[in-house]
Amino acid sequence: MAGHNKWSKIKRKKGATDAKRSKEFSRILKEITIAVREGQSGDPDFNPRLRTALINAKGVNLPKENIERAISKALDTSQESMYEPTYEGYGPGGVAIFVECATDNLNRTISSVRAVFNKKGGNLSTSGSVDFLFDRKGIFILPIGEQDPEALELELIDANAQEMEFDAESKELTVVVNFEDFGLMQKKLEALGLEATSSTLERIPQNTITLDLDTARSVMNLLDALEEDDDVSQVFHNLELTDELASSMVAE
């Protein structure tokens, strides 16, 4: 989790450009669409996945009218179907990469993802080739203000919190749970009256790979190119984000 947090902070320091904000909006709107169609409901009280998507929408200040339009469109059965394919491969230095997508055109998406791997020195592999190197976890980011983080951590242990990390600067508590405890933690936070700014399912590497700076930067270029693709929702990897690499990325 430390690697995940470190990269999240680097990206925040680099700043949320208009392009990155637009990408984040697009990702969450697709998540809302899929959640509504999958749950066959536009009511978050009866659709847990939609409830999670709306939490993330609020966390990035997605306009209310955009959310309502996405829900209305998703309820229209005449609209094109949405799919959630995943792709696995390796980057420079043997770094494992897992790509989650949301798309209405599978041929376009696979062609685009393959092209990025090929162009950036990676190799798209078969399903299952890197999945086993990651553990699926639920990650919650909680702004807790002046609340006592230690007292709150004791409360969250009851909901099977596996790992917690408090950032004194941002006053945020990061909570990690196993995949199967995601819903339990959501209910616990609701009972405590706590509202997460981010609530996601992520793939955390069991082990990381440390590379020399040049190779590591090549990997980061591949990851950035994947994340810029409109059909890509999330990208996970097992590259060790060293302080040297972090400093070089922030300096850009």
Image: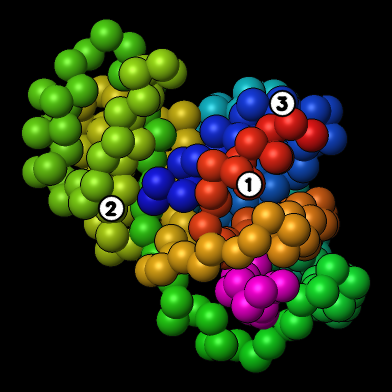
Residue identified by numbered label 2? 177
x%, y% of residue 28?
Answer: 65, 44
Label 2 SS = strand
> Visible in this render: residue 56?
no
Relative height, residue 21 to residue 144 (above, below): below
Decide which of 6, 80 is in the foreground and name it.
Answer: 6
Residue identified by numbered label 1? 245
Relative height, residue 91 to residue 159 (above, below): below
Residue type of the residue flagged with mark 3? Gly
Decide which of 80, 247 is in the foreground and name it.
Answer: 247
x%, y% of residue 37?
Answer: 60, 59
Q: Mark 1: few, some, or many residues within 10 Å (few <14, many ≥20)?
A: some
Give the side of residue 9 with respect to residue 44, left or right. Answer: right
Query: How many labels, in total?
Result: 3
Q: What is the quadrant of the C terminus in the image?
A: top right
Q: Along the polypeptide, which appears first: circle 3 or circle 2?
A: 3
